[in-house]
Image: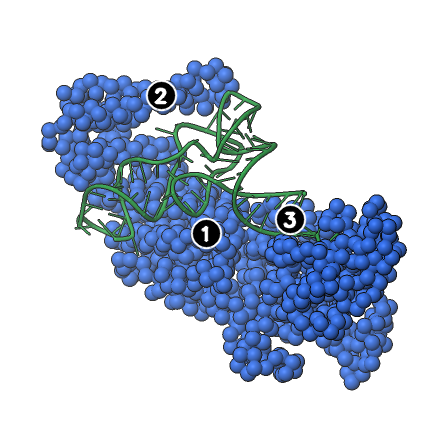
Amino acid sequence: MAEITKSYEPKDVEDKWYAAWQEAKCFAGHAAPGQETYTIVIPPPNVTGILHMGHVLNNTLQDVLIRRARLEGKAACWIPGTDHAGIATQTMVEKHLKKTEGKGRRDLGREEFLKRVWTWRDEKGDHILKQLRQLGCSCDWDRTAFTMDADYSRAVLTSFIKLFDGGHIYRGKRMVNWCPASLTALSDEEVEMRPTKGFIYKLRYELVEPSGELTHLTVETTRPETIPADVALAVHPDDERYKHLIGKSVWRPLGERAPLPIVGDIAVDPVFAAGVLKVTPAHDKVDFEIGQRHKLPVIDLLNADATLNALAGPELAGMERFAARKKSAELLRESGSLIEEKPYENNVGYSQRAGVPIEPRLTQQWWLRYPRVEEAKQVVRDGLIQMHPERWSKVYLNWLENIQDWCISRQLWWGHRIPVWYAKGIDREKLTEADLRDPKKIHVSLAGPADPENWDQEDDVLDTWASSWLWPFGTLGWPDAESQAKANFDAFYPTTTLATGADIIFFWVARMIMAGLEFARPGAPVEQRIPFKHVYFNGIVRDKQGRKMSKTLGNSPDPLDLITAYGADGLRFGLLQIAPLGQDVKFDESRVEAGKHFCNKLWNACRFRQMSGEMADNSSLGAVLGRIDPAHLDDDDHALLGALLDTMSTLEKSFAGFEFAGATQRLYSFFWNDFCDWYVEVAKARLQEPAAKAHVLAVQDLVIREFLLMFEPFAPFITEELWHLLGYDAEKSFVQETRIETAAGLVALFAKRGVTVDAAATGRVEQLKQFSTLARELKADQSVAQKRDVKFFALAGQPEWLALEKNLSKLARLVGAAEISRTTEKLSLPATVTSLGTLFLDTGVKVDPAAERARLTKEIQALNKHITGTEARLSNEAFTSKAPPAVLEGARKQLADQQAKRAELERLLAAVK
RNA sequence: GGACCCUUAGCUCAGUUGGUUAGAGCGUUUCCUUGACAUGGAAGAGGUCACUGGUUCGAGUCCAGUAGGGUCCACCA
């Protein structure tokens, strides 16, 4: 067995073990018949993305879950993959093309451009999946999926066809969110409202026929450049100021001079601005609806890239929209129509991805009426799908209550081209709902028409989310029966837990639920159709100022640098410690450093175990347990085993509740405080006793073994290395092939060997801990903390002395004393009062009485505060009559202890000479 | 406008059904390189648990409100 080195060097072990795991195909998701499964599908990162801190958190959580499931004996399957990310990837390649060749995508043509994207993907793609390996992620890489793979594409197109056949999909000319940068429609979810500073313009629209004193109407707008597209003014039908004008007209103040009707419409808010709204149906959603109600014409003066066209008039045609806004304000000023221009801030919709204001634009698009909306609400209400934290289900349900049809077509090339063909020569603009269902006019299929020469395929592709919403079953072979069998769809669907960010609850989570209910296992009971049972929402990783980490801000550390500096395990553990359930995390590198230190502590504890004595049979849990001698179990053993069991059940609870921060904390305090700081230290004395040595080592081997199993999901590399170095690998090659015991299971195994963990031992050990802390404190007070030749004398009653006597060698070592012995009289030495008696310290140096008095007085004063509080509580009749007996009893005992201690301190004070 | 979250030590955060003197890491003070670990050990300082009120024998914890910070949804020209 190799000797454990002085410090843990992550780089020495990480690559080695990852390669070994892959070689042994440890991560393969295989389910034996009847075996419980645990499935996770990765939230597929963009295929050309690189690993950032958000990925690290999200994927660490998934790896922790999947590794724990493996240890629990479940058939664990974590399916990795990437998303083609339509707009993002296409934009990236277009930029590259522009830079390197000075060409746009249309210069190359669709086919050639797509070739370039695939080349780009092949060169730059999947990098992130390699980075996940460095993090230790135990994905079943043989199942790696990509949303543009042939198989997956078949699933996407099949879903379209099924929805089309089911009447869920239609085509229509409607107002969409148009991105003038990406030149495509976007869904509502891809639009982000941002407060934007601009101007509001107060304008005169002259009445064609003045009405009494009224010669014009005042209109306020933020978009004067759209005036040439105005087709009416609208007022509220009940507005006393204007209702007599309904039916009259005003002159359009810019563009072609024409009379515009004044209409009455309840969409107008009479108390906002002047209460008069200019109606521009082509460029505003509300205006479009007003236009529809009043059968007004539509004048569209914007090109796809948001420059103005000829309809805007000669002065504005060809201009970019913001330049045109300035220009039109000038023109209006010149013509006297501009009354006032003032700074104004309003909410403007931006393309989330391109970062430019979107344009409401009337275009032909494909729309989806979501399927299974009611069922999707019900499965969450009924708890078939549980969200963690639970509050997100409210957000989810609220969205479903107000759900709008989904614009699923995108005017892009990189994506799944919609499997619809139009008969040649047909006017696509004029297709009716009936035409869509006419096979002579429209062909919808996977393979395409038999006579392709007579058809033209739809140019649009599907929204990326209209492919990723199939992810939980598209990655398991759906819709092909043979592929499903091969992927073992039957065993692994529904998946168990989805771990993702709440920012995509609508984009992805909600849609996956509807897709799963619609497509997976048609006809089966609902609990078999849902895509997952749990959704865990991890927080967003922010920087110290609370800002979201982003490439543009440059405030995100490179996870790979962190892995280099602290090890993958340190990074994983440190990050999870600060990642409470569903709360954003402010990234703090010092926590990652603490994670590294913890790994080193573990490493050295194991190293010390190796140095403490011959390694014995660690080949299995049974072997280790067999080496424990019940006759030699002392209080420290019992307390340690009790803490171990407590840690085990804490972890069981933490996993059930997705509370990983709590789990890491308990692991940390158990190992560092309970094991290293106390048990290993007191065991040093016992290791000198030949009779107890083998037993003590066995207890340590047991605790280290169980700890490694608990810690493995969080820190797979170091645990694997130590597992081998300490010989736990005799029966199974890797930690994850071992089964972890439950706390209850371990109790049962103890019982079989005649061991019952004595819960009361913990309290007795606690007394000894306090005793040694007080002894050390006394030494520090007397400035002899470093000296090891001091003598302690304990003035203790018989039972107290018995408790001390059993532990004298341990205690002497712990507190650094040459000797601890009993005294029966009060000594004239510095002293402290412990629960096991009064302890005197002989440093061999004369004591300063004044300092000693001051020290004791201070302590008495501190104690008095507590006594007063406790006395007040106990003298309160309401408390003594209503508090539960245990609480009351505790308070009385506390008071008695405090009073006894104070009395002793006072006696000591009086005795100081 | 609607919904939700957060506010605990200098910093980043724990604190699960209400119950002794509110914890950890980092930082900080003093001491220690004694054969696991200085990536360490020992001892300490540091908190009116944002504020106000309520429920209760008892509130960091439950309720109401206020202030500050943040998120999501909707959005008026």
Q: Which chain is green?
A: B
Residue at the (57%, 64%) spot, across then down: A44
Q: In whole angstroms, how far apart are the C-alphas of marks 3 and 1?
A: 27 Å
At horizontal 83% and vertical 76% (from top left) the residue drawn is: A427
Q: Of marks 3 and 1, which one's residue comes earlier in the chain?
A: 3
Kindly identify which residue carries mark 3.
Answer: A395
Above or below: residue A292 compared with residue A386: below
Dot 2 falls on a residue whose secondary structure is: helix
Image coords of residue A666 (percent x, y): 42, 44
Q: Which residue is mark 2?
A: A867
Q: Residues within 10 Å of mark 1 (few under 14, many from 20)?
A: few
Q: Chain of mark 2?
A: A
For badge 1, the amino acid type reads Gln
Q: Is residue A666 left or right of residue A340?
A: left
Task: Tell me what hue chain A is rendered in.
Answer: blue
Q: Position of residue A588 (x, y in %)?
A: 41, 52
Q: Secondary structure at mark 3?
A: helix
Secondary structure beneath label 1: loop
Give the label on residue A768, or none.
none
What residue sits right under mark 1 in the picture? A545
Crowding at label 3, few (<14), some or many (≥20) Cα neighbours within 10 Å?
Answer: some
Disc 2 marks a residue whose amino acid type is Ile
Q: Can you give x and y, in whole percent of width and height, for residue A392 in the image? A: 61, 48
